[in-house]
Every structure is written in C-alpha cells, then in structure tokens.
Image: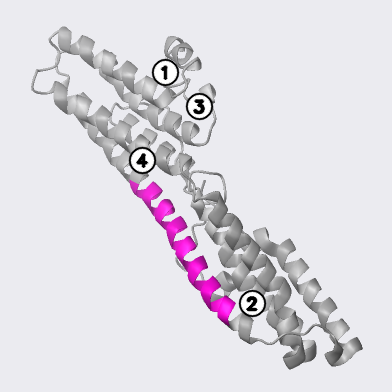
C-alpha cells in the first residue's frame, strides 16, 4: 500500500510515479497514442477521402462507458474496503482473545498461556499466507513447536487447523478445571470470530468480479481508444494525438485501476499491507506476555512510501 507523507505537496503527488496506474498502462497508452499519430498522418496525406467518422457515436459510447467503468470501480473498491474491515476485525479479535487467555485461564501454568498467545500470533501469519496461496513455515517457527508445524504440513486450510489445535488445548484446560464453565464459551467465541472473519476474506478471494464483465469492459475501452482518432482527426488535425493521449490515459487508467484493487490481498503496491498488519498484531499480543524477541514494526519505505 502506498502511504503518502502528510506533508506531501500537491506537486509531489502530481508527479509521483511509483504505485500509480501509469506503470500498468504505459505500453497500452503507447499503442493508443502511436495509433493516433499514424491516423493523423494518413489524414494529412489523403484528406477527406479516408474512413473518417463523426464524433457523435464516440460521445454517446463514452458516456455509457464512463458509467460502466464507474460502476465496476465502485464494485472493486467495495471488495477492497470490505477486506480492510475484515482485517480490522482480525486485529481486534486477536487482541481480545489474548486478553481473555490471560484473564480467564486461571490455574494453568504461565508457559501454557504464553503458548496459546503465540498460537494467536501464528494464526494471523498463516491467514496471510493462506490468502496469498503460500506456505512458509520459517515465518512461524519461532511461534510454534516442531510438532505443531509438522501437523500443519499436510493441512489444506492451515489457519483453521491451527484454530482447531488451539480449541483442543482449551478443552484440555477445561477438563483439568483450569477454565470456569462460564468462561469457556467466551474463549470459543474468539475462535468463532476468527473463523467468520477468515470466511469473509476467503469469499472475496474466491469470488472475483465475473470474467465476462471484465472482458467486455476491456474490449470496449480498447476499441474506443483505438477508434477515437477517426472521429477527432477531421476536427483537430495535428492536435489529435494530444487529446487521444489524455482521453486514453483516463479510460485505460480507470479500467486498470479496477483490476488492481479488485484483489486486495495480493502484492501490488495498492493492495492491503498484510505483512505490516500481521507483524503489528504479533507485536501487540506477544507484548502482553511479554516476549523479548518482538518483531520490528514495519514502516513505509522512505523513498517509495510503499508499506507491504
């Protein structure tokens, strides 16, 4: 995620390149502008004898296209914002269940409570890996025992498997009389909240915007930008490539922006900073123990302002 400086000037934002959509569309924009230059030269060579068009159809299509692109981008941003709200819930649930572990599991030894809190810290890392389709035991080996990591190796859904393992620990504590019968549902509710939040994230990841809808918009935007010079050249002459570049940047950029924020759990510069969020959660919950080898909190890169 790009985190601009609070003191950033209007000019610095205007000319910032990293994380802007221009990086994604520059070659498409190059093709569109090159096409308009070629059409402009052909018009100057052949005059009014070419297949030149009126601007009326482009005006009508442009209006409809703008509405559809706006609707599509709103849908993509809804997915992005829902993902952020779900991860906000993960943050709060991790802090809450940590407090409950420390206060509601009364008679067990301190090492066991610390182990359960490290389970919570490991869960958020496993959730991030799960949403990104990865498995890296090195990231959680300082939080889990070798036996627990071996248990996770063959699991398809490792975050859920870890929650089950933590629930089993709670049941043992309850059977040993270390958890009051009125307190066990409170601890279980924390695990349920994690499960529901993870399910919401998985829903976003596994249900993209319909492919046919995206394909239709991509094609209409491409055809519109490539055909636009045929309607402008008889009116603007040599100024046609300049206007086409501006219009192409707007339509291609809005189109690409919807693609980028549609999947908020990836590694793009404008995706959610899941590494920073999971590191912060681990720091918060382990500080309650307290542990000495706490992770360093992530901050935006001072040059690119990227926080991942």
Q: Which residue is mark 3?
A: 139
Overall secondary structure of the magenta stretch? helix
Q: Answer whether residue 78 is magenta in the image.
A: yes
Q: Residue at x 42, y 18 (%)?
A: 144
Counting from the top left corner in percent of width and height, residue 164 is at 32, 19
Where disc 3 sits, the SS reads: helix
Q: Looking at the rendered structure, which numbered label has been put on residue 200?
A: 4
Q: Which residue is mark 1?
A: 144
> In the image, which is nearer the foreground, mark 2 or mark 3?
2
Q: Is residue 298 left or right of residue 36?
A: left
Q: CA distance from mark 3 to mark 1?
A: 10 Å
Say if mark 2 contacts mark 4, CB within 8 Å. no
Residue in front for this viewpoint, 188 or 225: 225
Question: What segment carries the magenta color?
Answer: 60-85
Counting from the top left corner in percent of width and height, residue 94 is at 30, 34
In the rendered image, which quarter is residue 278 located in? top left
Q: Which residue is mark 2?
A: 247
> In the image, which is nearer the foreground, mark 3 or mark 4?
4
Q: Residue at x 49, y 57 (%)?
A: 3
Q: Is residue 299 left or right of residue 38?
A: left
Q: CA distance from mark 1 to mark 2?
A: 54 Å
């Amino acid at each position: 995620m790009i985190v601009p400086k609070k003191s950033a000037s209007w000019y610095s934002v205007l000319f910032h390149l990293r994380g802007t959509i221009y990086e994604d569309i520059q070659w498409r924009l190059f093709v569109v502008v090159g096409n308009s230059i070629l059409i402009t030269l052909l018009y100057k060579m052949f005059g009014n004898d070419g297949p030149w068009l009126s601007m009326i159809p482009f005006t009508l299509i442009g209006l409809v296209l703008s509405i559809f692109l706006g609707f599509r981008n709103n849908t993509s941003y809804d997915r992005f914002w829902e993902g952020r709200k779900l991860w906000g819930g993960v943050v709060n649930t991790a802090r809450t269940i940590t407090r409950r572990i420390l206060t509601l599991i009364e008679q067990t030894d301190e090492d066991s409570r610390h182990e359960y809190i490290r389970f919570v810290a490991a869960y958020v890392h496993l959730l991030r890996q799960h949403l990104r389709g990865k498995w890296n035991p090195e990231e959680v080996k300082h939080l889990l025992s070798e036996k627990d990591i071996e248990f996770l190796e063959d699991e398809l859904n490792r975050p859920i498997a870890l929650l089950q393992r933590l629930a089993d620990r709670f049941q043992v504590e309850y059977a040993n009389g270390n958890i009051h019968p009125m307190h066990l549902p409170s601890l279980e509710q924390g695990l349920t909240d994690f499960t529901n939040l993870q399910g919401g994230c998985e829903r976003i990841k596994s249900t993209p915007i319909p492919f046919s809808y995206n394909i239709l918009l991509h094609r209409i935007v491409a055809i519109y930008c490539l055909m636009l010079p045929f309607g402008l050249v008889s009116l603007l002459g040599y100024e046609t490539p300049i206007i086409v570049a501006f219009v192409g940047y707007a339509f291609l950029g809005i189109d690409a922006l919807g693609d980028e924020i549609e999947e908020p759990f990836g590694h793009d510069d404008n995706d959610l900073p899941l590494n920073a969020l999971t590191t912060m959660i681990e720091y918060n919950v382990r500080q309650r123990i307290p542990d000495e080898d706490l992770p360093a909190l992530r901050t935006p890169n001072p040059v690119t302002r990227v926080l991942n």
